[in-house]
Image (cartoon, grey):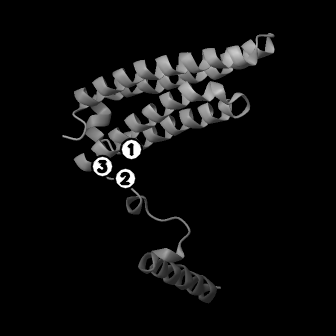
Amino acid sequence: MKKIIKRTALVVALFAVIAMAVPCVLRAQPVWFNAPSTTPDAQRSALQNVRAQISFFQNTTRTAPGYVNEGYAMVWQGFQAIRGAYGSFKSTLTPNQLAYGANDLADLDAGLDIIQEAFGNFQEDVNSGQSSASSFRNLCQVLSRATAVWLQQFNKVCARLRVGW
């Protein structure tokens, strides 16, 4: 019995040494290999990406009403691209920036959630019998204005957190 326990312990120890020496054998890699950069350049790049996504989105809200069937999907995808860019931006912030700006960042997150509710309102309008083309034009106008306000707040928060400095 003691031989089996010793042999099992030896096999486990050998596996642990191999796993540490050759991490590519493991399915999950340590977090530090995939951690985003928090350098000023990375922050500026992520900041510009958020601004670019907002600009693309606002262009989409101007042109999408002309594409009645595909327009909704275009607008939805554009909004999700903003969320993705904003999530990537937050991952470039330093721990100090995250701590100092926690309330502001939570407000920005909540703002995106509120803007997203407009999609549900559009569905309710269509389900209540309003014209889908008219409701969609209204949705696009609301989204364009709301993201413009959100961007203003985003820029203020970035200045306060000294993003990219």
Q: Disc 2, disc 1: CB below 8 Å?
A: yes
What is the C-alpha distance between the residues marked 3 and 1? Answer: 10 Å
Which residue does the numbered mark 3 point to in the structure image? Answer: 42
| Secondary structure state at the residue bearing disc 3 | helix
Which of these two is toward me, 91 or 59? 59
CB atoms of marks 3 and 2 within 8 Å: yes
Q: Residues within 10 Å of mark 3 (few under 14, many from 20)?
A: some
Q: Amino acid at mark 2?
A: Pro
Residue positioned most to the left? 165
Labels 2 and 1: the sequence-earlier one: 2
Q: Position of residue 107 (x, y in %)?
A: 42, 21
Q: In the image, residue 32 lies at what x, y percent?
A: 38, 60
Q: Earlier in the sequence, mark 3 or mark 1?
A: 3
- Give the amino acid at mark 3: Ala
Any part of residue 39 in sight: no
Secondary structure at badge 1 equals: helix
Task: Give the labeled residue for mark 2.
Answer: 36
Report the quarter where the C terminus lies: top left
Query: How far is mark 3 from mark 2, CA to CA?
Result: 8 Å
